[in-house]
Image: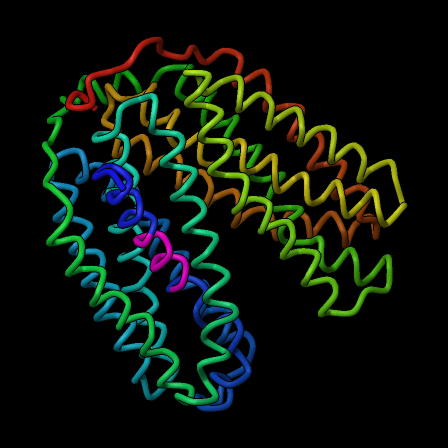
Amino acid sequence: MSGNWQTVLILAANLVLHNIQRFAPVSLFEELRAIWNSDYTGMGMLFGAHLMAYAVTLVPVGMLADRVDNKRLMMMGVLLSLASSLFFAISPDLNRAILARLGLGASGALIYVPTVRYLVSTFEKKKRASAMGCLEFGAGLGYTLALATLPGAMGPLGLRGAFLIPPAMAAVLVAVIALKLRSTRSTRRSIDQKRAVLTSWVFWAFFIFNFLGMLAGYAVSGWLPTYLRRDFGYGAVDAGLVAALVSGALMVFSPLAGVVSDRLGARKPVLLAGSALAVGCLAAMVMSRDIRVVIIAAVLVGVSKALTIPVAMIFAGEIFANAGAGLAVALTATTGQIASSLSGPLCGYILDLTRSFIMVWAVALACSVAKIPFLMVVREKKGVEDSRKL
């Protein structure tokens, strides 16, 4: 394997760790409630602490990533992940566990942003999207491992022993990063360069495109199981399996989307294809009550996310390089965080108001249609940039 693809494996492992840490408690809420004598509100606060800290630290880390060696930032993030997850595993009460989760959220930003910026700044343009697709696969694998491996490990290791697995992974990963990755150079973008990009219509058009797409995508990811249970009588396990097919489609097709983008030498055609696929699938979910059509359409929404999420991240790092690739990546990730945070309450309100999932899918469809014109005004840079300028 070439050095470049060894680098991809290490960067993908960063995102595996990142998502394991994000979702680690989700499957074990009942056990955690019992040992801390907590309620479900407490579990929600525990999960939300990571998301809040992650969202708050993304942009500062993005600005830092354009000025500081990304290898050093990744090592800081993994070390903070190790310390925070170890603190979480031994926390005697909910309050200290929430503090640990805040640390894990901050570590997530220190891992994710420099990881993606490292890819953008060290890979040739013709290989970037393929590599980013592999990173997205790693993120999906981390989600799957968090939901499946930790509950399985609780039997032989106990609850606290299961939560010692992530810090053990972090200890190995920080050593690998230190030994195998080379350092990166800073860009030192000026304030005027950043301001010129961040105040441009093109910048806001792209982020509106990304926001609307993520809002629609999270509507399906977040509410499909409830739709299947309420309107089609599915059990919790079966509904969860169908939802897993959607996330599996995102994980499997992300590398393929990256390869297609690199072969075309362009990002916009892939983003447009993903957007068009989302429109068609959501239209099918609005118009059809046939469960087979609903499931196929929902899985294809996962494919549409694979065509857009990793490619959009690379696209942002390339077209807004004058503001700094780190800042561009951070702002794109922040857009996703805001969309995911708003999608749940918005869709819940629509469902309470109308009592109809068709209206939830209709709003998601409207978002998917409305985002396409915003992408059309964004011009793609031609040619291969010098990676040292990113």
Residue 52 occupies quadrant: bottom left
- Left or right, 70 with respect to 289, comes to left
**Point 46% across, 16% down: residue:** 264
- Left or right, 338 with respect to 195, comes to right
Residue 217, image x and y in percent? 61, 41
Residue 19 magenta: yes
Residue 278 occupies quadrant: top right
Q: Which image quadrant: the N terminus?
A: top left
| Residue 2 drawn above or below residue 17 | above
Q: Is the magenta region chiefly helix, strand or loop?
A: helix
- Left or right, 63 with respect to 69, comes to right
**Point 59% across, 28% down: residue:** 274
- Left or right, 188 with respect to 88, comes to left
Residue 291, image x and y in percent? 86, 50
Q: Nearer the viewer, residue 244 or 52?
A: 244
Instruction: Point out the stretch of residues depicted in magenta.
Output: 13-20
Q: Which image quadrant: the C terminus?
A: top left
**Point 81% across, 35% down: residue:** 284
